[in-house]
Image (cartoon, rainbow, N blue to C red):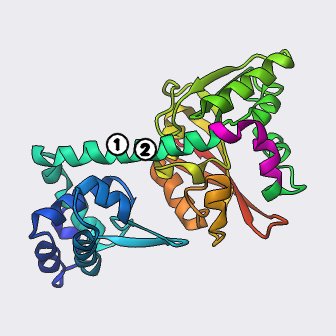
Amino acid sequence: MVSLGDISRDMDILIFCKALSDPTRIRLIHILDRHELSVNEIVAVMGMGQSRISRHLKILTDAGLLSCRRDGVWAFYGVPSEGSGRNFVTAVREWLRQEPDLEADMVRAAEVLEARRKSTSRFFDTIATDWDRLRLEILGPFDLNATLLDRAGKPGLAVDLGCGTGELLRGLAAQARSVIGVDYSMEMLAEAERRFLEEGLEGDFRLGAIEHLPVGDGVADLAVISLALHHLPDPEGGIRDAARILVPGGVLLLADFDRHEKEFLRERFGDRWLGFAEETIRRFLDGAGFELMELETFTLPSSLRLHLYRAIRRA
């Protein structure tokens, strides 16, 4: 547990306490300690005007209790991942969580995250039958599925998180004893199941969010997240739940884009995040209990860089 003694011994404590000397800013810290949100999402959760919210966000950011992460033209706020500001928030976290008046904010934040998921689900429902063709626009001749299958081995149970139309899952079915495909789009799952039936393959298809997988604890030998993380409302939560379903020593294969500035991908492909910096994924993996074993990088014809991480769940 972090104590106030872990905070640097200058005037940080005074600065932090002054920054929190307002009920609105206390609410903001409580929310953004749990979730990284855009300004519009924060406005929706708090039920206040944007100018008022922006003023409070600036005070907290200037004090070092929040950080602002730019993602293309979007800006997201959250508690810093390290430093004295993070230590201070960690030290007061339990006090904040014991305040019943703050729980309503967490309910509204959960509703905002669910709205994100439903928006993504509607997008993929409409393009399910065209998805494989659309992926080729980005990947070109690079065969990501074959690359993943080469590294998948022969697991007992393999779970494809964000399985889409089941293209990768069909390959996994030939290598694993059993497979589960999870997706938040009913149309994508229906298309995947239809293709499995046509080819006489056996697979278990489950509707659900990657951050809250409909899979038991410690049952999978392999989990794959292929070009799905950048669609998630909570990518760090998705990696955490992937760890939950894996046996100790189980393998996570994670493929996603490096940070980029191709804003058009949000509209064209429903991307939530414009890729992830390597250090961000490393932090997510470490926080979820993974040990990174290998990182490969591929440059696509579209000039995007794709990172492929192979990580092991620690015992």
Q: Secondary structure at mark 1?
A: helix
* Amino acid on which disc 1 is placed: Glu
Q: Position of residue 145 (x, y in %)?
A: 81, 43
Which residue type carries mark 2?
Answer: Ala
* Residue 215: assigned label: none
Q: Which residues are magenta?
A: 125-136
Q: Tell me if 262 is positioned left or right of 302 in this view.
A: left
Q: Residue at x 83, y 52 (%)?
A: 136
Residue drawn at x 67%, y 55% is 256
Task: Verify whether residue 144 appears in magenta.
Answer: no
Quadrant location of the N terminus in the rendered image: bottom left
Q: Image quadrant of residue 146?
A: top right
Helix, strand or loop at mark 2: helix
What is the C-alpha distance between the residues marked 2 and 1?
6 Å
Q: Which residue is mark 2?
A: 115
Dot 1 crowding, Cα within 10 Å, few <14, some 14–19, many 20+: some
**SS assignment for the magenta stretch, majority:** helix
Which residue is denoted by mark 1 in the rendering?
111
The location of residue 85, given as percent across then percent down, is 27, 71
Task: Name above or below for residue 11 compared with residue 161.
Answer: below
Q: Mark 2 and mark 1 in contact? Answer it, CB < 8 Å.
A: yes
